Amino acid sequence: MILVLSLLLVSCKQEIKPDDIKKLNGYWEIEKVVFEKGEEKEYKMNETFDFFQIKDNKGVRTKVMPQFDGTFLTTDTFENVSVRFKDEQVFLDYKTDYAKWSEEIVSISDEKLVTRNQQKIEYHYKKAAPINLLNDGEKTK
Protein backbone atom coordinates (compact mmCIF):
# COMPACT_ATOMS: atom_id res chain seq x y z
CA MET A 1 0.00 0.00 0.00
CA ILE A 2 2.81 2.42 0.92
CA LEU A 3 4.61 1.64 -2.34
CA VAL A 4 1.47 2.38 -4.37
CA LEU A 5 0.90 5.69 -2.55
CA SER A 6 4.56 6.66 -3.02
CA LEU A 7 4.38 5.93 -6.74
CA LEU A 8 1.15 7.92 -7.00
CA LEU A 9 2.70 10.95 -5.30
CA VAL A 10 5.81 10.81 -7.47
CA SER A 11 3.80 10.42 -10.67
CA CYS A 12 1.63 13.46 -9.81
CA LYS A 13 4.62 15.79 -9.54
CA GLN A 14 4.77 18.41 -12.28
CA GLU A 15 7.64 18.08 -14.72
CA ILE A 16 9.23 21.50 -14.94
CA LYS A 17 10.91 22.24 -18.23
CA PRO A 18 13.48 24.96 -19.04
CA ASP A 19 10.79 26.87 -20.94
CA ASP A 20 8.69 27.08 -17.74
CA ILE A 21 11.32 29.25 -16.03
CA LYS A 22 10.16 32.36 -17.90
CA LYS A 23 6.90 32.08 -15.93
CA LEU A 24 8.86 33.11 -12.82
CA ASN A 25 9.35 36.63 -14.14
CA GLY A 26 7.04 39.14 -12.53
CA TYR A 27 5.35 39.84 -9.22
CA TRP A 28 4.37 37.04 -6.81
CA GLU A 29 2.28 37.35 -3.67
CA ILE A 30 2.53 34.68 -0.99
CA GLU A 31 -0.79 32.98 -0.24
CA LYS A 32 0.20 30.44 2.37
CA VAL A 33 3.03 28.46 3.93
CA VAL A 34 2.64 24.73 4.53
CA PHE A 35 4.92 23.27 7.19
CA GLU A 36 6.39 19.76 7.11
CA LYS A 37 3.72 18.27 9.37
CA GLY A 38 0.88 19.84 7.38
CA GLU A 39 0.13 22.94 9.45
CA GLU A 40 -0.71 25.95 7.31
CA LYS A 41 -0.25 29.67 7.75
CA GLU A 42 -2.39 31.76 5.41
CA TYR A 43 -1.58 35.30 4.30
CA LYS A 44 -4.67 37.35 3.56
CA MET A 45 -2.82 40.63 2.99
CA ASN A 46 0.80 41.26 2.12
CA GLU A 47 2.78 44.44 2.47
CA THR A 48 5.46 43.14 0.10
CA PHE A 49 5.55 41.03 -3.05
CA ASP A 50 8.46 39.11 -4.55
CA PHE A 51 9.59 40.34 -7.95
CA PHE A 52 11.58 37.86 -10.03
CA GLN A 53 13.65 38.89 -13.01
CA ILE A 54 15.33 35.82 -14.55
CA LYS A 55 17.15 35.55 -17.88
CA ASP A 56 19.32 32.64 -19.02
CA ASN A 57 18.70 30.95 -15.64
CA LYS A 58 20.21 33.83 -13.64
CA GLY A 59 18.67 36.91 -12.11
CA VAL A 60 17.34 38.48 -8.93
CA ARG A 61 14.44 38.29 -6.52
CA THR A 62 13.54 41.68 -5.04
CA LYS A 63 11.02 42.65 -2.37
CA VAL A 64 8.61 45.33 -3.61
CA MET A 65 5.77 47.18 -1.94
CA PRO A 66 2.55 47.82 -3.91
CA GLN A 67 1.26 51.39 -3.83
CA PHE A 68 -2.32 52.65 -4.09
CA ASP A 69 -1.68 54.16 -7.54
CA GLY A 70 -0.63 50.81 -9.04
CA THR A 71 3.11 51.35 -8.84
CA PHE A 72 5.64 49.49 -6.71
CA LEU A 73 8.32 50.76 -4.37
CA THR A 74 11.47 48.67 -4.47
CA THR A 75 13.16 47.83 -1.21
CA ASP A 76 16.90 47.37 -0.78
CA THR A 77 16.30 43.68 -0.10
CA PHE A 78 17.24 41.36 -2.95
CA GLU A 79 18.82 38.00 -3.62
CA ASN A 80 20.81 36.81 -6.61
CA VAL A 81 19.08 33.74 -8.07
CA SER A 82 20.35 30.91 -10.24
CA VAL A 83 18.09 28.22 -11.67
CA ARG A 84 19.56 24.72 -11.41
CA PHE A 85 18.23 21.57 -13.07
CA LYS A 86 19.24 18.35 -11.30
CA ASP A 87 17.82 15.03 -12.49
CA GLU A 88 14.05 15.66 -12.52
CA GLN A 89 14.14 18.50 -10.00
CA VAL A 90 14.54 22.24 -10.48
CA PHE A 91 16.07 24.46 -7.81
CA LEU A 92 16.30 28.17 -7.18
CA ASP A 93 19.73 28.80 -5.65
CA TYR A 94 19.79 32.09 -3.73
CA LYS A 95 22.87 34.04 -2.71
CA THR A 96 23.37 37.22 -0.73
CA ASP A 97 26.44 38.69 0.92
CA TYR A 98 25.40 36.86 4.10
CA ALA A 99 23.88 33.52 3.09
CA LYS A 100 23.25 30.85 0.44
CA TRP A 101 20.21 28.58 0.26
CA SER A 102 18.11 26.63 -2.22
CA GLU A 103 14.43 26.02 -2.82
CA GLU A 104 12.95 23.39 -5.09
CA ILE A 105 10.28 24.48 -7.55
CA VAL A 106 7.45 22.04 -6.85
CA SER A 107 5.08 23.48 -9.45
CA ILE A 108 4.75 26.54 -11.63
CA SER A 109 2.07 27.91 -13.93
CA ASP A 110 1.17 31.33 -15.26
CA GLU A 111 -0.77 32.04 -12.04
CA LYS A 112 0.66 29.78 -9.29
CA LEU A 113 4.11 28.96 -7.89
CA VAL A 114 5.00 26.46 -5.16
CA THR A 115 8.52 26.15 -3.77
CA ARG A 116 9.93 23.92 -1.00
CA ASN A 117 12.99 24.67 1.10
CA GLN A 118 15.43 22.24 2.72
CA GLN A 119 13.29 22.15 5.89
CA LYS A 120 10.40 20.83 3.74
CA ILE A 121 8.40 24.04 4.17
CA GLU A 122 6.30 24.86 1.11
CA TYR A 123 5.62 28.41 -0.04
CA HIS A 124 2.49 28.90 -2.17
CA TYR A 125 2.39 32.05 -4.30
CA LYS A 126 -0.10 33.58 -6.68
CA LYS A 127 0.79 35.91 -9.52
CA ALA A 128 0.24 39.48 -8.38
CA ALA A 129 -0.77 42.49 -10.40
CA PRO A 130 -0.65 46.19 -9.65
CA ILE A 131 -3.60 47.56 -7.69
CA ASN A 132 -5.00 50.98 -8.51
CA LEU A 133 -7.29 52.08 -5.69
CA LEU A 134 -7.30 55.72 -6.75
CA ASN A 135 -9.72 54.95 -9.58
CA ASP A 136 -8.26 57.76 -11.64
CA GLY A 137 -8.97 56.00 -14.91
CA GLU A 138 -5.30 55.54 -15.70
CA LYS A 139 -3.98 52.14 -16.56
CA THR A 140 -1.46 50.62 -14.19
CA LYS A 141 1.92 49.52 -15.54
Image: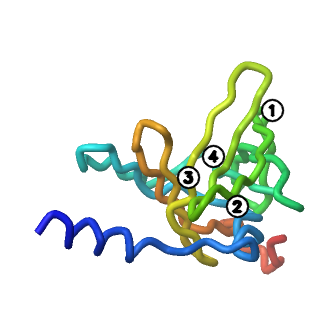
Along the viewing direction, whichever of 73 and 35 lies nearer the viewer = 35
Q: Is residue 132 visible?
A: no
Along the viewing direction, whichever of 88 and 40 lies nearer the viewer = 88
Residue marked by disc 4: 48
Lower sequence index among marks 3 and 1: 1
Q: 10 Å neighbourhood of mark 4: few (<14), some, or many (≥20)?
A: some
**Which kind of residue does numbered mark 2 sit on?**
Tyr
> Which SS class for mark 3?
strand
Lower sequence index among marks 4 and 3: 4
* Spatial separation of the CA atoms under disc 4 and disc 1: 12 Å
Q: Residue at x 80, y 40 (%)?
A: 80
Residue marked by disc 1: 76
Q: Nearer the viewer, mark 2 or mark 4?
A: 2
**Which kind of residue does numbered mark 3 sit on?**
Glu
Q: Is residue 32 visible?
A: yes
Position of 89 with respect to 56 (left or right) is left
Q: 10 Å neighbourhood of mark 1: few (<14), some, or many (≥20)?
A: few
Q: Residue furthest left?
A: 1
Q: Residue at x 58, y 70 (%)?
A: 108
Residue marked by disc 2: 27
Q: Quadrant of residue 69?
A: bottom right
Tags 4 and 3 touching, CB below 8 Å = no
Residue marked by disc 3: 104
Along the viewing direction, whichever of 40 and 44 lies nearer the viewer = 40
> Which SS class for mark 4?
loop
> Which SS class for mark 1?
strand
